Structures are given as C-alpha cells and as structure tokens.
Image (cartoon, helix red, strand yellow):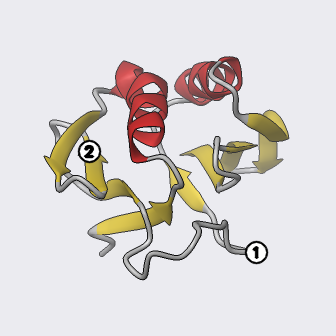
Amino acid sequence: MIAYTTIGTSDIEKAKAFYLAVLADIGGAVMMDLGRLAALGTPSGGAMLAVCTPYNGEAASPGNGNMVSIAPGSKELVDSLYAKALELGATDEGAPGQRMDSFYGAYFRDLDGNKICFCHFG
C-alpha cells in the first residue's frame, strides 16, 4: 500500500550518506536522485524512504507524532541497524526490545531529528 515516505532534511548530501550507511546491510541504495530529493530502496522493491529539502524552501523540521518504520527482516538486523544509526550520530529514542508479543522495535532520531523505528513482526 505505501509507495514511499518522505522526510525533510536541511542537508540532502548528509542525509543520503547517513541513510545509505545505516541501510547498507539490507541492500539500501539510492533508487532515484533528483538533487533536492533522493529515494532509497532495496533491490527487492517495495516501499522507499525519500529524504528531501522542503519544496516550499522553508526549514526542514520533524513532525511531532510522525515516524517512519522500517522492517529489515529479523530482530538481529533491528539490533545491528539501530546500533549503526547511533554510531553515525543518531540519538536514542528507545533501545531494541520486545514491545508486544509479536512486535520487536528500536527507535532513534536521525541527524535532522526525524523519528525512525526499525521493527520486526512475529
């Protein structure tokens, strides 16, 4: 159902480098680059994550209550991608752990303050 999610950034090159490094272990790559917007996805297809400078030219800011959730495929990948994000300068918003019987998640804020979750169902 979801084709892509877009989050704002104040520095497109820094955001691309951050997400390419964080998502490298699951095959994350730039699928489309329009200069002010880059869409990252995986070779298997599916929903993409786009980072962009705001179209209206105003400052990028994270929305309160907005969050992007990425399912990398296992609890181990949730743990390792979360750790990699923190190593690259992200801030902790909730260490990896079982949240419900069938949901395992880890939360962080990226370099621009956007809230991101890595999760595994099952």
Percent coordinates x, y for residue 99 in the rendering: 81, 49
Question: Which of the 4 quarters of the picture holds residue 16?
Answer: top left
Residue 4 visible from this viewpoint: yes
Q: For the residue marked with disc 1, what is the amino acid?
A: Asn
For the residue pair 107 and 121, the one nearer the viewer reads as 107
Residue 122 visible from this viewpoint: no
Question: Which of the 4 quarters of the picture holds residue 20?
Answer: top left
Q: For the C terminus, give its image quadrant.
A: top right
Residue at position x 40%, y 66% in the image: 5
Percent coordinates x, y for residue 121 in the rendering: 56, 48
Percent coordinates x, y for residue 63 in the rendering: 68, 74
For the residue pair 65 and 12, the one nearer the viewer reads as 12
Q: From the viewer's perspective, tell me whether residue 91 is left or right of residue 68.
A: right
Q: Which mark is residue 41?
A: 2
Residue at position x 49%, y 62% in the image: 7
Percent coordinates x, y for residue 31 in the rendering: 16, 45
Residue at position x 15%, y 36% in the image: 43
Toward the front, the furthest residue is 57
Q: Residues within 10 Å of mark 1 (few under 14, many from 20)?
A: few
The residue pinned by badge 1 equals 64
Q: From the viewer's perspective, tell me whether residue 55 is left or right of residue 58.
A: left
Q: Relative to 112, say whether 87 is above or below.
A: above
SS for dot 2:
strand
Q: Residues within 10 Å of mark 2 (few under 14, many from 20)?
A: many
Q: For the residue marked with disc 2, what is the amino acid?
A: Gly
Residue at position x 64%, y 43% in the image: 110
Q: Relative to 114, say whether 19 is above or below.
A: above
